[in-house]
Image (cartoon, rainbow, N blue to C red):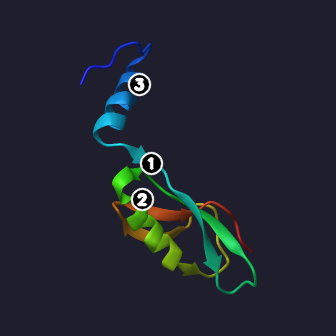
Amino acid sequence: ITVVGNSCKRGEVYAISECTNPQRSITSTVRVSNRENVMVSVKTKDTVSKNKIFEVMKVIRSLSVEAPLEIGDELCDNVAGTKIIATKKVE
């Protein structure tokens, strides 16, 4: 694969990755079971292959966590090679 027209090496690396193995960060929300009508925002700690998005979302949809939560708390480990972490503080 050849990339042309880029002005930096990072652009070339990104373009090749997009063509060969696209990666995405996944963001969503998870229910906080011990708080009424409260959700916590979450994301994958690392990017995952685009073809793993549905697998990761299936796990995220099945999660329920309890407060208190801090930003960066790990909510689930080893989902498609990454972790699901909280991106919001819940008292």
What amino acid is at disc 2? Ile
Instruction: Name the residue tied to disc 1.
Output: 24
Image side of residue 5 versus residue 87, left or right = left
Q: Quadrant of the N terminus?
A: top left
> Which sits earlier in the primary sequence, circle 1 or circle 2?
1
Residue 12 horizontal/vertical position (percent): 36, 23
> Mark 1 to mark 2: distance in Å?
8 Å
- Residue 73, which numbered label? none
> Mark 2 to mark 3: distance in Å?
24 Å
- Residue 53, which numbered label? 2
Q: Are marks 1 and 2 in contact (CB under 8 Å)?
A: yes
What amino acid is at disc 3? Arg
> Which sits earlier in the primary sequence, circle 1 or circle 3?
3
Mark 1 packing: few (<14 Cα in 10 Å), some, or many (20+)?
some
> Which sits earlier in the primary sequence, circle 2 or circle 3?
3
Dot 1: what SS?
A: strand
Q: Residue at x 64, y 72 (%)?
A: 69
Instruction: Name the residue tied to disc 3.
Output: 10
Mark 2 packing: few (<14 Cα in 10 Å), some, or many (20+)?
some
